[in-house]
Amino acid sequence: MPWHEAAFGDRLWYREQGQGPALVLVHGWCMSSLVWRFQLDRLSAGFRVIAPDLRGHGDSPLGSGECSMETFAADIAALFHHLDLAGAILAGWSLGSLVAVSALPLLGRRVDGLALICGTPRFTSSEDFPHGLARVEADGMALKVRRNLKRALEGFVARMFVPGELAGDGREEQIRALLAAVPVPETDVAFQSLASLVGADVRKQLPAIDRPTLVISGERDPICPSPASAYMAERIPACRHVVYAGCGHAPFLTQSEQVSACLADFSREVRVAYV
């Protein structure tokens, strides 16, 4: 798999598989490009699927920058320019959805469509946004990260799935092995990334999104609740919202074939619209 030079002269690792229209997949907090294995395998038959490791995650070193939303977005823009991508679909999961929205103004017509998977415009709740986690819960996550990152991530991964969800897919062992293979980032990377997630608020940017957008959510997502996705879908002008019943925070894993097909259909629809 190749490298490219990211913002500040640092290197970023990415996976690339297949040929055709570009589909760029951005992972979530403390994860890596490994989580997109099912999409890489299934969609590469008709698409050029590209999945980067955000700086400090997976095989990408932290380098000279910080794990801020601005730096993540700049790195994604640098990858697009490095690969000379045009007319791509940019998809982000969880933290990656915020990165995708933040990167969009930097990308211009290099992006024809946006897919936001189990995302939220604001991670924590407020008086005018009741769809996030309570701030005390976010503070508790930060404390757990500082105390024991490995244990904190084990708890986070367990929480991604609702009871019975993994067994219902028939891929429980495969999914657990995939997630166990994700490299654990440095504690400072996890803490900085969590701080960038907690501090992000892209609500004002939603009405300005002028690309066709697909919002995907898990009906029972406890981390980025489905109403947060509905909030985004209601405010993005050209948007479709797909909810996967009985799913938690990672339907692209437990309902991988359906989500992959949904992404493929969306990409084709966008291409037709731009012809």
Image (cartoon, grey):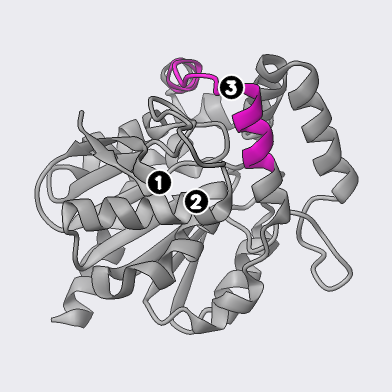
Toward the left, the furthest residue is 19
**Residue 94 in view, yes or no:** no
Could you tell me residue 100's position as x and y percent? 45, 59
| Towards the viewer: 202 or 73 | 73
| Towards the viewer: 269 or 169 | 269
Res 200 → quadrant: bottom right
Provide the residue span drawn in magenta: 175-194
* x 65%, y 49%: residue: 196
In the visual, does 63 lie left or right of 136?
left
Q: Which residue carries the number 2 mark?
A: 71
* Mark 1 Cα shell of 10 Å, populated few (<14), some (14-19), many (≥20): few
Badge number at residue 186: 3
Could you tell me residue 224's position as x and y percent? 66, 51
* x 79%, y 25%: residue: 144
* Mark 3 Cα shell of 10 Å, populated few (<14), some (14-19), many (≥20): some
Label 1 amino acid?
Phe
Q: Secondary structure at mark 2?
A: helix
Judge whether 166 appears above or below 92 on screen: above
Could you tell me residue 73's position as x and y percent? 45, 56
Residue 176 is inside the magenta segment:
yes
Label 2 amino acid?
Thr
Q: Secondary structure at mark 3?
A: loop
Badge number at residue 8: 1
* x 65%, y 38%: residue: 192
In the visual, does 20 lie left or right of 162?
left
| Towards the viewer: 60 or 180 | 60
